Amino acid sequence: MTNRRDFLAACVRSGLACAAGALVGGGASRAAAAPPGLGLRPMFPDPRRRIRGDSSVLAAWRHGLVPPAVAPLSRPELPVRRSLAERFVDLRRHFIFEYYPWYGGPPRYEHWDQWERVPPLDIGANYVPRLGAYDVRDQSVLEQHARWIAEAGVGAIALSWWGRGSYEDRAAPLILDVMKEHDVKVTFAMEPYADDRARSFAQDVLYLVREYGERRKFDAFLVLRDEFGNEGPVFKGFRCILPETATDCRNVTRSVSDYTPDGEWRRQTDSVRDALRDSFDSVTLLADSLEFKRTPASGFDGIGIYDNFIPPEDYAGYAAGASAAGLVFSFNVNPGFDSIEPRTIPGVCYAPQPFAPPTDGLDWTRSEDRERAAVRSAERIGASWSATQAVQTDPALNDVRRGFFLVYVNSFNEWHEGHAFEPMKDYADLTPIERAYAYHNASRGSYRLETLGTLLRVAQQDGLKRTA
């Protein structure tokens, strides 16, 4: 593999140990209560249908292996640090939209047909996107996405990736081409694309670096710079740290088919670092996990939490646990959760997933309730923004000590789960047929992206004010 340092040179020539320590290990005796209403049915991935299954966090939660978040200890005031914009000259790149390249157009309408929906008007979402049931391979769609992302102030996306040769992999070259033209960098979120995908994890990471970094001379590939100037790629995995078995509401226990022992993960993560040692200062590998014993044992550098059901008020306790385990951490900015449900109930253990943040008595046919949900969603964006910035800029915790700052924004366009920042149609623009499906669109369909954009502008301006 080309040494990236040589390539760039050629271009130039032409904390909280006591309180947090109780969290390390996360045994069942200290397990946190599972989020209410999430149901008792373990969700397993189905790579053929791009169904992801439970995250590592939710899988462990069902098994009683997630420790409770705890309040950090009080301590003397610490020195005020420089603003984020002063610490990170490439601050835009440290905000990454989760991006889903799995949507297709007619005649198959890939993914818009999720959970028995019949596109193009009956789609697998509670909200109708402003662009309708689009094809992510349509260049005009991608250009509009890139404009929205760049105008909001986000500097990177993480492509949901389902293995070499997958639909999503084939869509990647055009996505990188378009994002490059709008100065948006691209990285990858490693999905559960096969039960034994951990065995090929190192080779798959190297494939992504080679195919979408080296061969393109790193024109669109995200190489993140920490506060100290060290540079390297960052990859986040989904369903990495899993229990070996799962038990459903009928007390039936079965093996978790994509369980990977910690030792196997360690061999893979070590292999990635060995292979890229001469090309980058570092490689950052994140797992979606709150297991603070197994995650470092598996060789991951830190945690990147995907789940929007974790309330922002818990970020501080889990950040303390990660820091005590020597891990960096990234908690997302999100608008909550509003998932579609299957029309045929899949078994006695099924329970619908609730709207988040908790909002009582929503009637989606009423404009007042749709607007109330939008207000709660905007509030969650602000709360998760404040909470993740607070823990990631706390001098007592590991992110600051390591010069690390990274915020995933969940998501740009995961429409199934209802947390897309991509603009939806204004409710007034829905057709009579679309209104008959009782979609949840707000009166102003761009409110989430506008809210995020305002927060990002303030973060950038803070640095400008301090250096003026």
Image: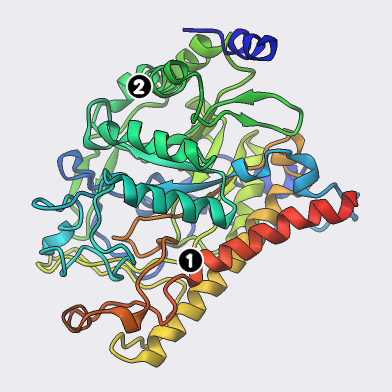
Q: Image quadrant of residue 117?
A: bottom left
Q: Amino acid at mark 1?
A: Pro
Out of 177 and 439, give the one closest to the viewer. Answer: 177
Q: Image quadrant of residue 216?
A: top left
Residue placed at 28% from the left, 60% from the top?
Answer: 416
Q: Which residue is identified by label 1?
A: 335
Horizontal side of residue 414 vs 180, given as left or right: left
Distance from the alpha carbon under mark 1 to that under mark 2: 31 Å
* First-in-chain label (1 vs 2): 2
Q: Which residue is identified by label 2?
A: 204
What colour scheme governs how the chains and residues are painted in the rendered image of this protein? rainbow
Whether residues under marks 1 and 2 lie with C-beta atoms below 8 angstroms apart, the answer is no
Q: Find numbered disc 1 in the image and state the secondary structure of the residue it sits on.
A: loop
Residue 163 sits above or below residue 463 on the image: above
Horizontal side of residue 67 vs 240, given as left or right: right
Circle 1 crowding by C-alpha within 10 Å: few under 14, some 14–19, many from 20: many
Circle 2 crowding by C-alpha within 10 Å: few under 14, some 14–19, many from 20: some
In the rendering, at what x and y percent does residue 350 appear?
A: 20, 65
Residue 31 appears in view: no
Q: Check the image and name the residue furthest to the front.
A: 14
Out of 128 and 59, give the one closest to the viewer. Answer: 128
Horizontal side of residue 26 vs 364, given as left or right: right
Out of 30 and 236, give the one closest to the viewer. Answer: 236
Residue placed at 27% from the left, 61% from the top?
Answer: 40
Q: Find numbered disc 2 in the image and state the secondary structure of the residue it sits on.
A: helix
